[in-house]
Amino acid sequence: METVSKNTLRHSVVFLSLLLLFGAAVVWNINTGSVAISVREILTLLFRKKEIESGALAADLPAFNIIWKIRLPRLLLAAVLGGALSLSGFLLQTFFRNPIAGPFVLGISSGSKMFLAVVTIALSASLPSVPVSVTVAAAFLGSMASMLFVLAFTGKIRDMSMLLVVGIMISYICSAVTDFLINFAKESEIVNLTHWSLGSFSAASWQDVRISALIVLPAFLCTFFLSKPISAYALGEGYAQSLGVNIRLFRVLLILFSSVLSACVTAFAGPISFVGIAVPHICRVWLKTAKPVLMIPACFFCGAVFCMICDLIARTVFSPTELSVGTVTSAIGAPIVIWLMAARGAKRNE
């Protein structure tokens, strides 16, 4: 009974801490930049928007535009996509039963880049620039195509480690095709592809936030409702089948939701590495449990906070030069994964 109460207290503290960190990250992101805005002014501009727009309340209009047109959509997109990327990583690690499985490893980003290269080169002759909507659609289709190839092998390959290798091989194939296509691309197209492949939230708009939320939030809810089957599957396919879980359908749903979540990220922000691998490990350490009913919301909120902080670092640490968010997540996420793996190995040797 005492152990249960301690675990409940730990879980409550973790979720409360994540909530506080989320709030702090929101204020910190809005407050920090080339134009500093006080916390009091932020609250006024956020909660009295209609009065300011109608002219009933005098306000600093440049600060109002900076918050509502630049910083707020950017941080919300980082939060939604960061949560999606972390949750996708958790689902893939569960599916493959492998701690290094993640969206970046399994060819999702490579498939996006390949489709984007094809579309960019194909349309360059007829259009001066590729519309953003076409770029997003191409990246999304590329991500889904890569995961559909992996999904096609799930019925033929039972060994999860071999299935993971298939995903990695698909990533290499997509990268090879992209490198081949780049030989026939213009210099400006190569620059655009390179910039996109580094990952960034800088082009965020309210439309991007709305579309990504309409994709990510329903996928999050559906994943949460699969908590019990995921918990059973984690204990073995035989055990899950004994509880009435349709393994073939369940595996398809698991890979489908993880693909949709990660495809949405690559479509709107480009490939962002290590978030999907590092954050689930962080949540397991904090919660000291792998129960999906706790891990799913924890991964989502922790991923949101992680990406918001990384994006803040990317745009401010070398201001006015902005780093790609993928560079920051790799620099922070890779050491975290190495440390967690070393700590796990040390515990096993004790």
Image (cartoon, rainbow, N blue to C red):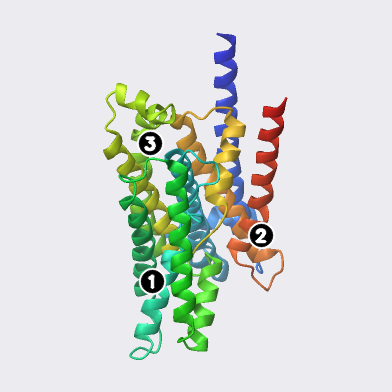
Question: Which of label 2 and label 1 is nearer to you?
Answer: 1
Q: Is residue 95 above or below residue 227?
A: below
Q: Which element type, helix, strand or loop, lies under badge 2? A: helix
Quadrant for the N terminus in the image? top right
- Marks 2 and 3 sit apart, C-alpha to C-alpha, by 31 Å
Return the disc, 1 or 3, that comes first in the chain's sequence: 1
Return the disc, 2 or 1, that comes first in the chain's sequence: 1
Asked if marks 1 and 3 touch (Cβ < 8 Å), the reply is no
Q: Is residue 5 above or below residue 345?
A: above
Q: Is residue 75 above or below residue 322?
A: above
Residue underneath mark 1: 115
- Marks 1 and 3 sit apart, C-alpha to C-alpha, by 31 Å
Q: Which element type, helix, strand or loop, lies under badge 1? A: helix
Label 1 amino acid?
Phe
| Residue closest to the far top | 1
- Position in image of residue 99 (x %, y %): 54, 41
Q: Residue at 63% across / 53% down in the picture?
A: 28
Q: Is residue 260 left or right of residue 350?
A: left
Q: Is residue 289 above or below residue 219?
A: above
Residue underneath mark 3: 224
| Dot 3 crowding, Cα within 10 Å, few <14, some 14–19, many 20+ | some
Label 2 amino acid?
Ile
Label 3 amino acid?
Phe
Which mark is drawn over residue 313?
Answer: 2
Q: Residue at 49% across / 34% down in the picture?
A: 295
